[in-house]
Image (tube, rainbow, N blue to C red):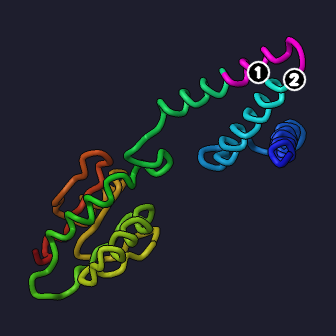
Amino acid sequence: MALRWASGVIAGSFALHIVGAALVRLPYPADRTGLQYLPLLGLTIALLVDVLRNAAGRIRVAAVLPAVTAVCLTLHYAVQLNWTHFSMWEYDSDDKQVVRKLDSFRPADGSTLNAGASWQLVPSLEFYRETGNRVWLKRFIRERKLADYDYYVLLPQYRNLVEERKLTVLYTAPRTGVIIARKTTARL
């Protein structure tokens, strides 16, 4: 009974979404905003299979159709599964290796390393800084226009900053092209 109620709510909310899109230009879910529909669709298909399988007469054979649909949907999403990164944040897929590379620039005298980063990278770089207990690495600050730093972690589209500030490129991440650069006068 709970599965029937849940499936009704799911089907109803999906129908309202379609009506809303048609009437008031409500946008369809994009990227990760529609992820809730995937498990909910699975519940609805499971209910449909159960209802049709327990029906009387020849309609029981119709249970094969939603079951085949479920298998096809599962295969469709399984072949798209990406184990290396979340597709919306592909630029973050090398961040762990980038922070490990920053480890090799750790000051030997125990001082802190002052590094700035492209604002899109800051949350994940800050995560690795904190979880790795990298107290020698100053906190990354999310800013649209980078201040003056000794080291920089930049997305490829900020390569112009390398030329503008006359930075030396120390590392380029293989998958994303994220750049670690330093001021020419910065200590190694």
Residue depicted at 60% across the width and 48% down the height = 32
State which tag comes first along the sequence, 1 or 2: 2
| In the rendered image, the vertical position of residue 19 relative to residue 169, given as above or below | above
Residue 146 x, y percent position in the rendering: 38, 71
User: Could you say whether the residue bearing mark 1 is in a helix, strand or loop?
Assistant: helix
Q: Which residue is the site of mark 1?
A: 63
Quadrant where the C terminus sits is: bottom left
User: Could you say whether the residue bearing mark 2 is in a helix, strand or loop?
Assistant: loop
Per the model, the C-alpha gap separating discs 1 and 2 is 9 Å
Q: Are marks 1 and 2 in contact (CB under 8 Å)?
A: yes
- In the image, is 52 to the left or to the right of 80? right
- In the image, is 149 to the left or to the right of 57? left
Residue depicted at 41% across the width and 68% down the height = 122
**Label ID, residue 55:** 2
The answer to which image quadrant residue 180 occupies is bottom left
Main SS of the magenta part reads helix
Residue depicted at 31% across the width and 81% down the height = 138
**Label ID, residue 18:** none
Kind of residue at badge 1? Ala
Magenta segment, which residues? 56-67
Kind of residue at badge 2? Ala
